[in-house]
Amino acid sequence: MATEIEHKYIVTNDSYLQGYRSSTYFRQGYLTTDKHCVVRVRIAGHRAYITIKGENRGASRPEYEVEIDPEMAQSMLDTLCQSPVVEKTRYIYDYKGYIWEIDCFHGENEGLVMAEIELEHEDESYDLPPFVGRNVTGIERYYNSCLAQRPYSMWSEEEK
């Protein structure tokens, strides 16, 4: 079983745009968003995937991912996935030996920018880049699956 260990943060400024390694446009939708099992269809650039994620236990959860045909993924996004489809540009940024993924959301989630770091171990220590703010790991409304159900544009100022 694969385990995903990640921490999520709000991005406070756009300094990541100076020195990022690469960027990719994503479209992703959800076939199910049950808290025990999330099934996602994603098109990332010219590749596509179906991903199954289990329930969070702190910053960890089981995760399985398989590459699929991009045309099949597009058909699933158009016909089977919940609306809205989550759209974002992901920037890859190297910082002090770690890879950070900065997601700049579009569409109904415009204005939300988050940074994620994936770790090998729960207790691993790392330094925060200068664009990283508040830790939102484990706050459900920041999960992409929740953004598909209740987009950032619907949040109150207090929630933001």
Image: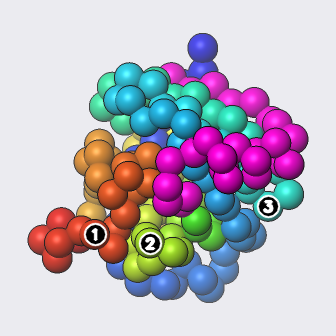
Residue type of the residue flagged with mark 3: Gly
Q: Quadrant of residue 16?
A: bottom right
x then y, percent, for residue 82 = 50, 48
Look at 53% across and 65% down and name the residue there. 103
* In the rendered image, the vertical position of residue 125 relative to residue 14, given as above or below: above
Q: Which residues are magenta?
A: 62-86
x then y, percent, for residue 29 = 57, 49
Q: Residues within 10 Å of mark 3 (few under 14, many from 20)?
A: few
Look at 72% across and 66% down and name the residue there. 24
Residue type of the residue flagged with mark 2: Glu
x then y, percent, for residue 137 = 32, 47
- Label of residue 45 in the image: 3
Measure the alpha-carbon separation of dots 1 and 2: 8 Å
* Pointer 1 or 2: first along the chain: 2
Element type at marker 2?
helix
x then y, percent, for residue 108 = 44, 72
Q: Quadrant of the N terminus?
A: top right
Element type at marker 1?
helix
* In the rendered image, the vertical position of residue 131 relative to residue 29, given as above or below: below
Say which residue label 2 marks.
Answer: 108
Viewer-closest of 82 and 26: 82
* In the rendered image, the vertical position of residue 8 relative to residue 55, given as above or below: below
Residue type of the residue flagged with mark 1: Met
Say which residue label 1 marks.
Answer: 154
Q: Quadrant of the C terminus?
A: bottom left
Measure the alpha-carbon separation of dots 3 and 2: 20 Å
Left-right relation of 148 to 16: left
Q: Residues within 10 Å of mark 1 (few under 14, many from 20)?
A: few
